[in-house]
Amino acid sequence: MDLNAFGRGAAQACSNSKMSDAEPHTGTTIVACTYNGGVVLGADGRVSTGNYVSNRASNKIMQLTDNVYLLRSGSAADTQAIGDYVRYFSEQLAGELGDDPSVQTIANLVGTMNYNNKNMLMGALLVAGFDKHSGGQVFGVPIGGTIVPEKWAIDGSGSTYIWGYMDSAWKPDMTREEAEGFVTEALALAMARDASSGGVIRTVTLDKDGATMRYVGGNEVPLFHEELQPPAAAAAGTASMVVG
Amino acid sequence: MLPRPTSHSKALGPGVAGPELAVATSAVQAGPPKASAQQPLSGADSFMVDPHCIADPARQHTQYPYVTGTSVLGIKYKDGVLVACDTLGAYGSTKRYKSVERIKKVNDHVIIAASGELSDFQHIIKLLDELTTDDFRADDGISLGPQEVYAYLCRVMYNRRNKMDPLWNSLIVAGIEPPHAGASAEDVSTSDVTFLGMVGMIGTHYSDSHVTTGFASHLARPLFREAQADDMSEEAAVALMHEALRVCYYRDKQSMNKFQLAKVTKEGVSISEPYALDVQWDFKMFSQPTKWAVGAW
């Protein structure tokens, strides 16, 4: 029952909830953070169906336009559907405008879908992007459809473990490297304690020159107390072989 | 001999023939499910994302609030009306969004503030924006007064309640009636035109010299009853408001020490930047409350 921890109480109270153990959820950690000149977004890679990890390297960062990305947490199906609709609407809008839509417009599309289908959807989303009007921006779109602009945002079940870290370590006007390190460290801390988050770390950095994707494989994610760094792949093969 | 079909009314109990209830209950369908393979059973069109197009009358939408704001306070004073609230958007017990503006200007004569689900408040703002945009386009110098906004919102909230699909908010509408065409603001005394009203999520509404929502109804109303007067000075009104906000901050767990104060006078609307109040924690008994009662807390 790897529900988004925030949605758990709400789902139980909501009579329209269709949550069953078998429905795949992105028990997840997603982080987005603005910095001086752009925005960094990151997510873990675990999708679970009950206790089973159905996908250990999923990509929860969905590209909506060239300059705006969506981070998904909550019901895997609902968030994929919302992302698909908004990507379609944004493409139409970009064609009409002859230019990239603003991040705020796309965030409003996502929020409107969440709001108008409030009783059917369970998606807690972050919209992050870079446009020439206002630079790097992050919008939180939690369940229910509220739209909140923020300097940094976290969501997903793993986010409960890192509120303290985010509050203490965030500072305004970070450099690109500081912001990327901040996001990666936050994700690693959440993955260390949340069973519903794990696997890989994916980050995307957006600035005026475009997007840069980074992939941190499961054996290179920073580790903390009482965890062991896995040995390099070739050595593991020979060391564990027993010839008998 | 074929058995005569009897219609059973849930209201009358089993085995009794009686008239069907006027409204289909959840166990009784108005008709057989649609046979169309491409249409969802609810009756909505495919890919329809607007719930108002979903035609099935038995569909129930009663919601649950997710991101909520807490108390809002409002009092009348000599020059107009003051409204204050904090800037927290809570997500259950998590103090999640700390810079949320829960007081919004509608036009130069009216402000609105809300507690409850913030997405529904954002929707209400959109509805009011439509009205003010119409006023702007009419360009006849007439704009909505607080009484009209209040009446409009009463109807919106009550009608949503009747559809079992409420907007989960308690709203405070405050303002000064704009002068009639041809009249000037000085012709009328402020106390005759100041308005302060509350509309709840099921359409309950009232107007008074002091209104509150949420916790403040229990904590702040008694203070207002004692000390508020329609002709109090601005300094006294602000001091009373601060006292009430302080109590709400001490005693409401879903609150924070970051407030906005809005003022409507004949000159117009102003909403302050967020600020914190001085709070008192230096009571001697606070530092050692169990000194003479070891084991207590």
Image: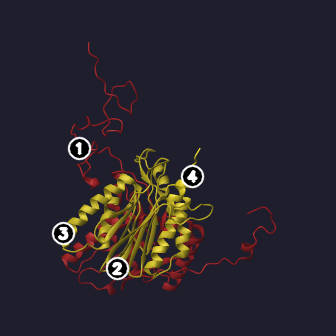
Chain colours: A yellow, B red
Circles 1 and 4, Cβ within 8 Å, touching? The answer is: no
* Position of residue A155 measured from the top left corner of the image (x, y, whole percent): 46, 63
Q: Nearer the viewer, mark 1 or mark 3?
A: 3
Q: Which residue is mark 4?
A: A240
Q: Nearer the viewer, mark 2 or mark 1?
A: 2
| Host chain of mark 2 | A
Circles 2 and 1, Cβ within 8 Å, touching? The answer is: no
Q: Amino acid at mark 3?
A: Gly
Residue at screen point 38% across, 53% down: A76
Q: In 3D space, how far apart are the residues under numbered discs 2 and 3 (Cα atoms)? A: 21 Å
Residue B90: which disc? none
Q: Secondary structure at mark 2?
A: strand
Q: Which residue is mark 1?
A: B39
Q: In 3D space, how far apart are the residues under numbered discs 2 and 1 (Cα atoms)? A: 43 Å
Q: Secondary structure at mark 4?
A: helix
Q: Nearer the viewer, residue B58 or A55?
A: A55
Q: Which residue is mark 2?
A: A135
Q: Nearer the viewer, residue A111 or B284?
A: A111
Q: Which residue is mark 3?
A: A95
Q: Give the mark nearest the N terminus, 4 or 2.
A: 2
Q: Nearer the viewer, mark 1 or mark 4?
A: 4
Residue at screen point 50% across, 79% down: A171
